[in-house]
Image (cartoon, grey):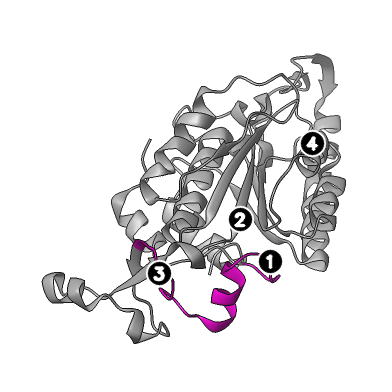
Amino acid sequence: MALPSELMAKLELLRVATRRVHSGRYAARTRSRRLGAGIDFADHRTYTPGDDLKYVDWTLYGRLEQLMIRLSEEETELPVHLLVDLSRSMEHGVGPDSADTKSLVARTSAAALSYVALSNLDQVTIWPFAGTLGPPLALPRKRSSVIKVWDHLESLELPGGSDVLGAAKAWVQRPHQRGVVVLISDLAMEGWDKALEMLLHDRNDVGLVHLQAPSEVQLPLKGERFDLVDAESGEVLRGVTRAEVEALRAELPKAHVELERFCRRRGIAHVSTVTGEPTDLEHLVLTLFRGRGLLR
């Protein structure tokens, strides 16, 4: 699945947001907004208000009448790491077949964030996880490599379960450059708070894309007793009463408030969304991702 061309054109105008001054040459560009000062040409990006006109490619403008900024290799050093949940619960849902799964929206979100970073020649690495941290994918720094994100995430089969804390521990222990780390998950298992704390303690900018299926927000209840299936393990809990299900559902708003407070207090860019039929990508990426501080 490819990102819509109209959306890709809009993504090229954005950047992955960062609060810290990370090591590498990108930090100087972030402070001074100097673009294209290097010797080795790497790519173009669309001119945005505030860019220094002396870095406009006037030859290209003369041919195409488009204002484009020249980018060089030495100015694009922001490491962007995307931890993408591929556990079984990401495929789970109760409702119409036309509704997007969480896993589909997760892959699309990873592709969109990757495309923004690659448009600025940032270094992007995809880190899939489920029961364990899977094999990473380091993308070549060119926009066309975004197709590798989808192929990599769709082809993997990882051990069952969902261990976000274990994935965070394994990631911190692996050799990596500090930068921006975005966790894309439904947070189906406990330990998400410790996982986010661990990523922060590693001195990264941290973002969270929290995905929910419509059935997790409002499950249609027919009858008085139910057999509930654990989406991760497949274990069946039989004879659950309507009152027990409703009591559990009543706790969800409190959990969402707790998550929001946790992220706000720690400066974590937090996006929470319910997948739709189909999910409005422009609203998700251009409105929510920008409004909540993942992109700027």
- Marks 2 and 1 close (CB-CB < 8 Å): yes
Please tell me how crowded label 1 is: few (under 14), some (14-19), or many (20+) other residues with Cα within 10 Å: many
Q: Tell me the residue that label 1 is attached to.
A: 22
For label 2, count other residues whose C-alpha is less than 10 Å away and answer few (under 14), some (14-19) or many (20+).
many
Question: Quarter of the image containing the N terminus?
Answer: top left
Q: How far apart are marks 3 and 2 (CA)?
A: 21 Å
In the rendered structure, which amino acid carries the disc numbered 4? Ala
Residue plotted at (71% across, 70% down): 20
| Mark closer to the chain start, 3 or 2 | 3
Q: Read off the magenta span.
A: 18-43
Q: In the image, 180: left or right of 69?
A: right
In-front residue for pair 41/189: 41
Figure check: 136 above or below 44: above
Instruction: Point out the tag, 2 or 1, that comes first from the N-terminus.
Output: 1
Label ID, residue 249: none
Q: Disc 1 on helix, strand or loop?
A: loop
Residue 251 in the figure: left or right of residue 116: right
State whether residue 288 is above or below residue 279.
below
Name the residue type under label 3: Ile
The amino acid marked with disc number 2 is: Pro
Q: How far apart are marks 4 and 1 (CA)?
A: 21 Å
